[in-house]
Image (cartoon, rainbow, N blue to C red):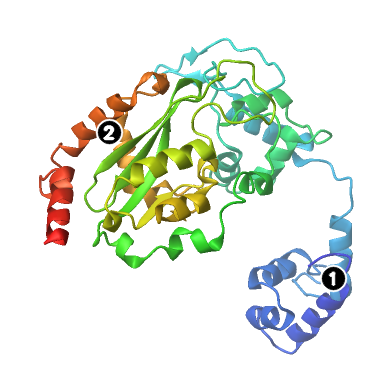
Amino acid sequence: MTTTAGSRPRSRCCVLLVAGCGVREVARRLGRSPSTISRELRRNAATRSGRLDYRATTAQWHAVRRARRPKPAKLAVNDELRRYVQDRLAGVVQGSDGVAVGGPDVAWIGRRRGRRRDRRWARSWSPEQISNRLCLDFPDDESMRVSHEAIYQSLFVQGRGALKRELTACLRTGRTLRVPRARARGRGKGFVTDEVMISQRPAEAADRAVPGHWEGDLILGLRSSAIGTLVERTSRFTMLVHLPPMDGRDAPRIKNGPALTGHGAEAVRDAITEAIVTLPEQLRRSLTWDQGAEMAQHARLRIDTGLEVYFCDPQSPWQRGTNENTNGLLRQYFPRGTDLARHSAEDLTAVAAALNTRPRKTLAWKTPAEVLDAYLATAAA
């Protein structure tokens, strides 16, 4: 309950408790969560009589007093707690003999160091791990409690800096600034609507009963090179899409200029269209992709090919499990950290043929090419 508009709900809560209502009944009548009512009774009850009696005026006084700001940060006033948190964040890594292992010598530069760079070695517990471990290490000491959000604020928010800012280098991401979740969720997803989510995909695609439903993705290499992968869900038949870099990729970058890496939305749309139209119509039912920006022109792709396009939920690669497994097989031919642009379309065709003629356990040791040929022969009969 808030302090500014909480006096009236607290009065109603008090009346209902006197009438003999339980916590859940009070919560239902006030339109609040039972946990909110339980916390209110525990934190703001009157204790002068020696027992927990809930009175609206006393509860309001407790809430107003607790809400006063500025309030000293808990990590700033509790030295033992601060040392515990700092040790779990930045404590040295030790070998099996207890000797400290220093790791790379990395100086603090006040910002994130970027990918493929050495990072400082530390114990690097997450704030959530630290917060929950305190309850196990100090079960009887209520002063040794701090929320994970309080730790994050001490690291990131200036003015609540009980912890040194350079300790952000010990976080898993290494970020020196927080990224609001709303900003991350909304990035590059404007082309995805409820009508094209995977929940709207036909049931026949989920049970793999009918061929013609595909899963797609990009595998990436050095210098933003990429190869498109298309995998048919029933037969595991694989097609590789050639995405050569465009002219001018090595020239200085132009802000807000066209995508020259070869896997912009237009390039991916044209390359998939060129590959899909070579298939019989009964093998062009649907395509499931992740929410990458390279599929921003999915509506035009659907018009050009007749292929229904669906998108997975955010951070849900298992919804394209067949494609993810195939991408792992392809890394034998196209390892991470290599320039994929050096491979020609003929090279990709040869690698796809190697996978499509490889027997699969899930297909009773038949090859994807054999399964697809058998389906086409049956459909033509």
User: 330 or 72, which is in the foreground?
Assistant: 330
Q: Name the amino acid, label 2.
A: Leu
The quadrant holding residue 342 is top left
Q: Nearer the viewer, residue 44 or 186?
A: 186
Q: Residue 66 or 304: which is nearer the viewer?
A: 304
**Residue matched to label 2:** 329
Q: Which residue in the protein does label 1 denote?
A: 6
Quadrant of residue 60 in the image?
A: bottom right
At 68% from the left edge and 70% from the top edge, which residue is drawn?
Answer: 38
Q: CA distance from mark 2 to mark 1?
A: 60 Å
Query: Dot 1 surroundings within 10 Å: few (below 14), some, or many (20 or more)?
Result: some
Residue 15 position within the rendered picture, expressed as x and y whole percent measured from the top left: 80, 85
Furthest residue in direction top, as rendered: 105
Q: Secondary structure at mark 1?
A: loop
Q: Badge 2: how crowded within 10 Å, few (<14), some, or many (20+)?
A: few
**Image vertical order of residue 64 relative to residue 122, above or below:** below
The residue under the point 27% across, 52% down is 280
User: Residue 191, position in %: x, y?
Assistant: 58, 51
Left or right relative to 247: residue 219 = left
Tags 2 and 1 in contact by the CB under 8 Å rule?
A: no
> Whole-percent x and y of residue 104?
53, 11
Q: Foreground: 271 or 127?
A: 271
Q: Is residue 117 visible?
A: yes
Disc 2 secondary structure class: helix
Quarter containing the N terminus:
bottom right
Q: Is residue 146 at least partly visible in the picture?
A: no
